[in-house]
Image (spheres, rainbow, N blue to C red):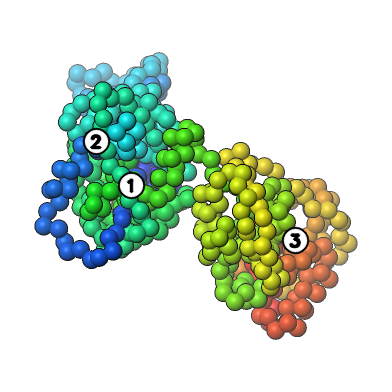
Amino acid sequence: MIKTTLSLFAPKAIRGTRLVTGVLGAMMLSTALAVTPMAPAFARAAPDSFADLAERVSPAVVMITTTQTVSTPTQQDSPFPDGSPFSDLFPNFPFPHMPQQQPNRPQQPRHSQALGSGFVISEDGYIVTNNHVIENADEIQIEFYGGEKLDAKLIGTDTKTDIALLKVEANKPLPFVPFADSDQARVGDWVMAMGNPLGQGFSVSAGIVSARNRELSGTYDDYLQTDAAINRGNSGGPLFNMDGQVLGVNTAILSPNGGSIGIGFSMASNVVKKVVDQLKQFGETRRGWLGVKIQEITPEMGEAMGLPKPEGALVSEVPDGPAKDAGILAGDVIINFDGGEVKNSRDLVRRVADAPVGEAVRVVVVREGKEQTLLVKLGRRETAEGEAIPAAVNRPAETQGEVLGMTLMPLNDQLIQELNLSSGQTGLVVKSIEETSAAYDRGLREGDVIVEAGQQPVAQLADLENQVKAAKDGGRKSVLILVRRAGEPRFVALPVD
């Protein structure tokens, strides 16, 4: 099974690789998890050979074979096992000793096998791999470098980082490899990948760290980019630094054909370590939850809010939860969380997720140009997701007018019903918009609802006009408005000149 971040493919040959179609036509992303490399404090020359390192760490690298019972047979059976490159080369080739699939043939359960990679992290048999390598598997078998095979038990998975933790019972302590500190990885550091590419068995490739802090599609993405060859079947295998520590779990490659072209991605070890610790302790993840919707701050928005720098995480909405209980408001800019500086929304998401559930933390916000420190007792994200957002109150007068290139009208019962909004919602609905206006350029469209301007609620046209005037009188170039589209909030800075 092959899982992708943009589109899903299911070639039966290799379970451990995700392919993604994306920019520049038929670009595909093949996944395989890898941890970020740890860089020494001094520069290193290119190694004469990777042989000593490969010999030292290979006993801790494993091949993973999964078996799954499926009820829908393929159009035709193949004599090649899943994980073999030949099953890709001959997907529909009729073999004389294999019966052809008949149109009305009843579906029969059958076993499907797939291959991936992993690595041992403790002598008592804990093994890390990708979630998509073992997802929906009925049986999981581990093969070690020396040929020994053991059945594995699934301890826990995390779909958000694509990590899975397995456990085997061995009659002796197992060779294992430690994690590196991925924050110390530097662009240009040497790295070595190991795994089971294309079902060919244990294989080694080498390269460098090409880039850091890459995002693909996940909330907690923190990938190292590498040019070390990673292919289908490498998923879940380790990316080593020159000290034999795991920098990342090989997860993805960008490619026009599904093969390595030197753009691979490995999930940073510092992300993986935290997930593994929780899976080992609880069998599941337990991430902190602040209870806010946030967005990035553009330079125009920062200017409209009077911020010295467009940094921090802008709170666009505060539903019932820890943040609301602590007094955080929509329009606040979070600049510090639990003693750590918050540069952007991605930074805040990671810091909150890493904080223990139930812990009281200090959150510094900028509100109306002044810093405030609030104490927030964090909830748990896994149990809080999907909670409803409460509606606002107060009914505006029904007048229509034009402001900043938009024809606006206060919400009424009919509009609320037409737009499928919550009962009691207030704001100004965009009835029409000039395509040459700055509002149109900033992404506003007919049907959007403006609920705030200048961080103040708007219920009538006069409310918005007053905030536009206040921005001009204050020498600001823009006014910050809060817009809802299909219930989702978003701040936009609109020029007032």
Amino acid type indicated by mark 1: Phe
Which residue position is annotated with label 1? 179
Residue behind mark 2: 175
- Residue 54 picture location, percent across and down: 17, 45
Q: CA distance from mark 1 to mark 3?
A: 48 Å
Image position of 5 with respect to 86: above or below: below
Residue type indicated by callout 3: Val
For numbered disc 2, what is the local secondary structure?
loop
Q: Quadrant of residue 356?
A: top right
Label 3 sits on residue? 451
- Quick one: quadrant of the N terminus? top left
Name which residue type carries label 2.
Pro
State the residue in front, 391 or 309.
Answer: 309
Location of the C terminus by quadrant is bottom right
Q: Say few, some or many: other residues with alpha carbon within 10 Å of mark 1 (under 14 / 14 to 19 / 20 or more).
A: many
* Residue farthest to the left, as pictured: 48
Residue 212: horizontal and vertical position, in percent? 36, 60
Residue pictured at 42% horizontal, 49% vertical = 271
Query: How dense is the environment of label 2, judged by Cα within 10 Å: few (below 14), some, or many (20 and up)?
Result: some
